[in-house]
Image: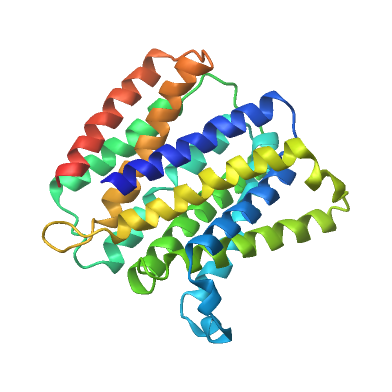
Amino acid sequence: MIYLLLSILSSTAIYFIFKYIDKFKFNTFDIIIINYFTAAILGFLLSDIIHVNLSVFKNPWVPFSAIIGVLFILMFVVIARSSQVVGIAVTTVSNKMSVIIPITVSIIIDPLDILSNLKVIGIILALIAVFLTIYRKRKVDFHPRDIYLPIILFLGMGLVDSLVKYAQYNYVGDDTLALFTVFIFVMAAVAGLITKLLRRTSLKNLINPKILFWGIVLGISNYGSLYFLIRALNHKTDLSNTFDGSIVFGVNNLGVIALSVLFGLIVFKEKLLKINWLGIIISFIAIYILSIT
């Protein structure tokens, strides 16, 4: 479970970095682009890429890495737009509740990922915990036609994790993991640059020392989040079986939310409602149930 813990810590670090970025009013999109270049370089350093030739493009996981990379940027744009139009609360719920999609996909494609009664209880408690933990008393005021934004976000984020699970289950072992991540983050970085050019914004800001610093820090955390998640999915148990994807995604999502909320309380002095505390308690119960199934 060490890889799952490291993935949770890496993802939680992303939350803090974005908090600081928002606090100092830096250009988030520029930092995101630097972040993907940094993550790609990390994957390059961890992979045996000097012995790689053009035949690598024949690997069946290449199309998946390309799609995932492009979706990273697209979902960032959707998150930004959805936050502006329908609000942060609805956007956050859509983002976090999307975990049900990769859980479902994992159960469908992995015959060893059996949906037991105890696991069903754990998954239901996990979804309840997600909603209660991130719940905030905010006025929901948007036009019904804009509901497509959180729906796209829900489906898109669910698709990203599902593609990661599918590629991992069928093609990506620990020996090809680093190279797989290189392709993902290179595609994300290129897609980000193209998006920036289409927006006709200056590229000079990308070499701003502060943008570079936060982009590198974010890239390290972002890479760790994906790398350790796939290592957790690949990890063999004492019975030589991998961990159920439904459990890995469920525990990872809950762990990130609970840890982020608790750290936000301690570090940023964020106030929690009673319903948030209830969500945190339920999340730990759900994590325990999922971990013993």
Q: How many marks?
A: 0
Q: Nearer the viewer, residue 25 or 198?
A: 25
Q: Nearer the viewer, residue 147 or 97?
A: 97
> Along the horizontal axis of the image, is 194 left or right of 172?
right
On the image, the x and y values in percent for residue 278 come to: 32, 20
Whether residue 122 is visible, yes or no, is: yes
Q: Is residue 240 above or below residue 269?
A: below
Q: Residue at x 67, y 46 (%)?
A: 32
Residue, x 48% and y 61% (percent of image)? 46
From this view, report whether residue 78 is shown above or below residue 187: above
State the residue lying farthest toward the front: 50
Q: Position of residue 54 (x, y in %)?
A: 58, 85
- Horizontal and vertical percent position of residue 145: 66, 44
- Quadrant of res 195: bottom right
Q: Is residue 119 above or below residue 84?
A: below
Q: Residue at x 35, y 37 (%)?
A: 254
Give the left or right position of residue 181, taking residue 166 as reference: right
- Residue 119 vertical placement versus 184 (above, below): above
Which residue is more in the foreground, 68 or 232? Answer: 232
Q: Is residue 236 left or right of residue 203?
A: left
- Indicate the position of residue 85 as horizontal and vertical percent values: 69, 36
- Say whether residue 67 is left or right of residue 200: left
